[in-house]
Image (cartoon, helix red, strand yellow):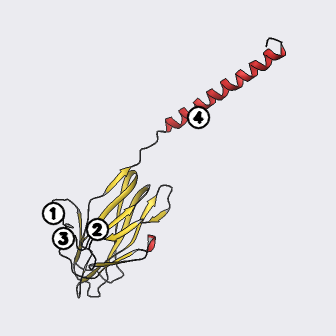
Amino acid sequence: MTGSFGSTNALQLYVVSQSSTSSYIRTTITFATPVINLSFQIWDVDAVAGQFADKIFNIQALAVGGATVGADSVTSDVAGYNTITGTGLSTVVLGTANAANNTNQGTIDISFSGPITQFSFDWSNDDPALGAQAIGLGPLTYTPVPEINPFSSVLVVCSLLVVFELFTRRHRNRGFRQLEGLE
């Protein structure tokens, strides 16, 4: 399942069968530090009647601070192989026709603006025959959010306190000089 990127490494997910159309596999990717502008592809989201109909749903990310957010964008590379309904947390992608494994026909593009610390999606078979199926998770593109060193915050606060102290001393000393008639 290369999404027409034959030389690109990817994560291939393959299921021989499942117990019901309500069974699913959740894939979760967690980042060591928050990221922004995440985009990735899921390849070969398609269907073969009497065997499988790929269903991708519950597409979400964990924002910095712990809120769950939906994808900012979910689109199909080539129309006719899957449908996309809903937006945000209610987005569902359903395979509708057979796509060739070495093309981008069943490819969907997903993006999150961020900052996020992880993302996940659920994948199931929506065909009652519950046959074998496979998809591929294409390359992830993102920008890491630089970590803020806790020492930097302390340095800023200390600098502000020094400036404040110098300012108040200057005004205090000026007031004493005026009282003593030196100014």
Image quadrant holding the N terminus, namely bottom left
At which x and y percent is residue 137?
27, 65
Seen at 22% across and 79% down, the residue is 132
Q: Residue at x 47, y 64 (%)?
A: 68
| Number of residues whose C-alpha sits closer than 10 Å to that of mark 4, classed few (under 14), some (14–19) or many (20 or more) | few
CA gap between label 1 and label 3 equals 9 Å
Looking at the image, is 32 positioned above or below residue 109? above
Q: Extreme front residue here? A: 183
Contact flag, marks 1 and 4 (Cβ < 8 Å): no
Q: Position of residue 142 (x, y in %)?
A: 34, 54
Residue 53 sits in which quadrant? bottom left
Marks 3 and 2 in Cβ contact (< 8 Å) = no
Q: Residue at x 18, y 72 (%)?
A: 101
Q: CA distance from mark 3 to mark 2?
A: 12 Å
Distance between mark 2 and mark 4 Cα atoms: 46 Å
In primary-sequence order, the first of circles 2 and 1 is: 1
Residue under circle 4?
Answer: 157
Specify the label residue 6 is tagged with.
1
Task: Report x, y in % for residue 36.
Answer: 40, 54
Give residue 59's quadrant in the image: bottom left
Identify the image quadrant of the C terminus.
Answer: top right
Quarter of image, res 10: bottom left
The residue under label 2 is 42
As helix, strand or loop, the secondary structure at mark 3 comes to loop
SS for callout 4: helix
Work out whether mark 3 precedes mark 2 in sequence or the reverse, and give the earlier one: 2
Residue under circle 3? 103
Few, some or many C-alpha atoms within 10 Å of disc 2 (few <14, some 14-19, many ≥20)? many
